Image: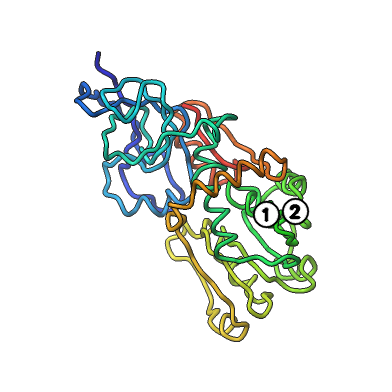
Amino acid sequence: MSVKCRKWVLKSHFSGMPKREDLDLVEEELPPLKDGEYMCEALWLSVDPYMRPYSRRFPVDTTMIGAQVAKVTESKSSKFAVGDLLAGSLGWRSHTIGSETTDVHKLDSTLYTDRASTAVGVLGMPGATAYFGFLNILAPKEGETLVVNGAAGAVGSLVGQIAKIKGCRVVGFAGTDEKVEYIKGLGFDEAFNYKTMGSMSETLKKACPKGIDMFFDNVGGEWFETVLTQMNLFGRVSICGAISEYNIDEPKSRAVNQLILFNQLKIEGFMVMRWLKEWPECFMQMSQWIAEGKLKYKETVTVGFENMFDAFLGLFTGANTGKAVVKA
């Protein structure tokens, strides 16, 4: 019996804010399985800000990129059995035929007992991004001050909590009063609505009277430039994202070389796949913190595969708190 797959295809590269006409939702009929292959059906799909700039690396008419959790529904493979839950970068598609070389892994039932969606969230790439981007890049010391923007998002909310676990003082910024209350509830020492706080520079001075030791930047643009002016000697910056610039054709910036030079700052961008072999260790630690009540997470769930674009667009309008996921 043939299976029809729905998939979102990139029709044109994004220019400015993503538009619905940039993507097509199409159907294709999948062929019968060959020996060594398996069929899986998407259960949970991830939408993430990186997809906006990263999709430009791919030609039009390709399936939109992204990770998902899928269930094996048919198998002629010795590697996976019917009923297995898999996670991998399968893209925005409802069904996938996989083989021995497909980039997926079977979920560890001892870790994903709560909800499988965490495999694309707190116990997936966003969780690893927070864990390694903070601990390995910023090398926190107890008592230091961290500033994190995008603090109510999938990564920022985790970074702030890990910093608190490590004994740091945490100042977070988010885009609504509700999100500010949310991160205060996570234990952030100071939290601000960047849309209503007034002067960014003055707010930082009041919130960080002893200066800033660490900056986890999810936003870029004016944030990066302004925070650098208040970094302490030998401060460290972890550049995770630049969502404020993703939909701007020509981002504006100013020279910051002297700030970096004279304060002897360490600034490092990173791609979380650098630590791929260490992800299992990360997820064990994160799951332990969750079990101990030290780490909390939140998901904004959009129901329906046909609503993938809406969930994606919401990332750039502030619609999500915590991790944005789509329940197929």
**As drawn, is 125 to the left or to the right of 138?**
left
Circle 2 is placed at which residue position?
188
* Image vertical order of residue 85 relative to residue 183, above or below: above
* Image vertical order of residue 234 relative to residue 91, above or below: below
Snapshot quadrant of residue 132: bottom right
**As drawn, is 20 to the left or to the right of 173?**
left
- What percent of the width, then of the height, locates residue 260? 57, 80
Which of the two residues, 261 or 18, is positioned nearer the viewer here? 261
Q: Say whether disc 1 or disc 2 marks the residue closer to the N-terminus.
A: 1
Determine the residue positioned at 19% across, 25% down: 34
Say what amino acid the circle numbered 1 marks.
Gly
Q: Quadrant of the N terminus?
A: top left
Snapshot quadrant of residue 209: bottom right
| Marks 1 and 2 in Cβ contact (< 8 Å) | yes
* Image vertical order of residue 215 relative to residue 50, above or below: below
Say what amino acid the circle numbered 2 marks.
Phe
Give the color scheme: rainbow, by chain, secondary structure or one colour. rainbow
Determine the residue positioned at 65% across, 49% down: 157
> CA separation, marks 1 and 2?
7 Å
- What percent of the width, then of the height, locates residue 12? 32, 46
Residue count near mark 2 (Cα–Cα under 10 Å), binned few <14, some 14–19, many ≥20: many
Residue count near mark 1 (Cα–Cα under 10 Å), binned few <14, some 14–19, many ≥20: many
Circle 1 is placed at which residue position?
160
Q: Secondary structure at mark 2?
A: loop
